[in-house]
Image: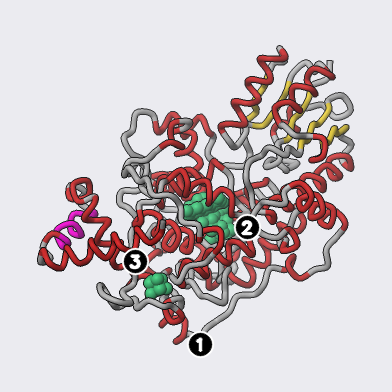
Amino acid sequence: MANTLLILGDQLTLESSALDAGVLGTDRVLLIEPRDAGPAHKIKRVLHIAAMRAFAVELRGHGWEVEHLPLADVPSFRDAVVEHLERWRPAELIVMEPNNWSQQKCLEEASAQTGTPLRLTPTCQFVTPRAEFLSSANGKKRLLMEAHYRRMRQSLGVLMRSDGEPEGGVWNYDAENRKTVRDWKKDVAPRPSRPPTSQRPRCPIVEEAIADVTRWFPDSPGQAEGFWLPYTREGALEVLECFVNERLPLFGDYQDLMLEDSPTMFHSLIAGPLNLGLLLPMECVDAAVQAYKDGRAPLAAVEGFVRQIIGWREFVNGVYWVKMPAYLASNALNATRPLPKFFYTTETNLNCLHCTIGEARDTAYNHHIQRLMILGNFCLLAGINPQEAHDWFLEMYIDAHEWVMAANVLGMALHADGGFMATKPYAGAAAYISKMSNYCAGCAYDPAKKTGPGACPFNLLYWDFYDRHADRFASNPRTSMMVRSWQKRPPAEQKTITAEAKQFLDGLE
Ligand SMILES: Cc1cc2nc3c(=O)[nH]c(=O)nc-3n(C[C@H](O)[C@H](O)[C@H](O)COP(=O)(O)OP(=O)(O)OC[C@H]3O[C@@H](n4cnc5c(N)ncnc54)[C@H](O)[C@@H]3O)c2cc1C
Ligand code: SF4
């Protein structure tokens, strides 16, 4: 009897272990474009639909029999799976480990309902086997990215010397990878190249995906017409190559820099295709390491990039599977304020937020520091409800998926997991934003002003945050100094700051 090989919409790789487990000429591949995949930016929807349709063509070209259920026919993913299983009665439903928890549950339910055995094969989209991460985390009160990253470097032999020490003698080049706006100007303001796929005429698959998204999801944020990313493996490899050849050499230097008129800076732009399986993590790592070996990119930049892929990406995925399903409800700081409407309209006179949210709306992309130190930082300091923030991030980005969003938003940005994956909150005042961006020059507020008319709200909210959470952060060695510094201030000054912060926060509602 034939099996069904279900390829989920974010598993579009011929390296899929589900395909490996199947028999060409006997088994049937199932691809589903569901309309109930949750809120998403229109550009992300176009990417997913175009990529699935192109992958179906590729699979057929390799001889697979493919049942491809298009958007118009699939109001519900679960119902579509059940109907397929009831119609074809396959011996087994074979699926590569789903990347998202709820999808796995849904498949388990469909399998139980129809009496079809479900076989999950190991994912090839991450380097660390899921079971291995789960067993290494077992019983631990907190997990450290750095420990995980070093283990990965050692076990994979990436940027390691033959004596077992890291290439260059140190594990981490973060200190060299933090050039400021002033440094950038001194370096004669280098500008990044544009990704090659954004400069081409559109092909019919993309045109059709744009038409379908416009028809079925008129209320999703953004404009489908703004689609700018690769949706095939070939295009994804081109974007990777363009990054390695043209932007990687400066990736490290300007990794944390934010410029109003240069949204992507020297970042790789690979997360969208990588999270769909159009690229695999080790080929990205290998391409960067090769550039270092050939003398085309400096070690600090290459180490910084490698850290993102086999460090952070693998780590947040591991944290997700260790902590789900309870993780999504995390709210250790009891933050209850609703997400302000300007996250959708961009209408705010805080220029850093206005610019960053506007770029997300127009392109479905912000780079990491914009996500963490502008948007996440604001939500953390203002006490925005973590679930509302999480849902907004999940809706806005081209690369958004629950497995990656949960730990980044709830853990790293909002400290809602109580410090399980980040030893201190990523809280910053205006001094950080003004040093690392050019947003403040065009802002109604003054980053140097701490109180009074024109004082930057980040300055007020920063201290108000430590006031509200003094008990929790006084006992944390990485934050106790901030709490002491706040508590040493004259009571009148404290009163002014907390009163002005309250006024600002009340105004948000
Ligand atoms: C609040 C918040 C939300 C985020 N949401 C997402 C998300 O939905 N999807 C997503 O892929 N990344 C997310 N990230 C991580 C990171 O910001 C994006 O991966 C990155 O901005 C994507 O752009 P890029 O491809 O140009 O990445 P680069 O800056 O060039 O980095 C290279 C690659 O490293 C990986 N990476 C780097 N940092 C992380 C990280 N913290 N977690 C996971 N992967 C990482 C990505 O695959 C990325 O493509 C989030 C970070 C924060 C702080
Ligand atoms: S002054 Fe404050 S609000 Fe304005 S851009 Fe700078 S940090 Fe943002």
Disc with the residue nearer the chain's start (2 vs 1): 1
Q: Quadrant of the C terminus?
A: bottom left
What amino acid is labelled 1 in the image? Val
Left or right: 316 with respect to 290? left
The answer for how far apart the CA atoms under marks 1 and 3 are is 29 Å
Q: Is residue 470 magenta?
A: no
Q: From the viewer's side, name the closer residue of 242 and 480.
A: 480
Residue 485 location, quadrant: bottom left
Q: Mark 1 points at which residue?
A: 188
Q: Nearer the viewer, residue 131 or 380?
A: 380
Q: Mark 3 points at which residue?
A: 458
First in sequence: mark 1 or mark 3?
1
Q: Position of residue 338 (x, y in %)?
A: 43, 49
**What is the x, y in percent for residue 152?**
47, 45
What segment is highlighted magenta in the picture?
478-486
Q: Which quadrant, please, contains the N terminus?
A: top right
Disc 3 secondary structure class: helix
Q: Does the residue labelled 3 lie within 8 Å of ligand 2?
A: yes
Q: Pick the residue in front: 198 or 341.
A: 341
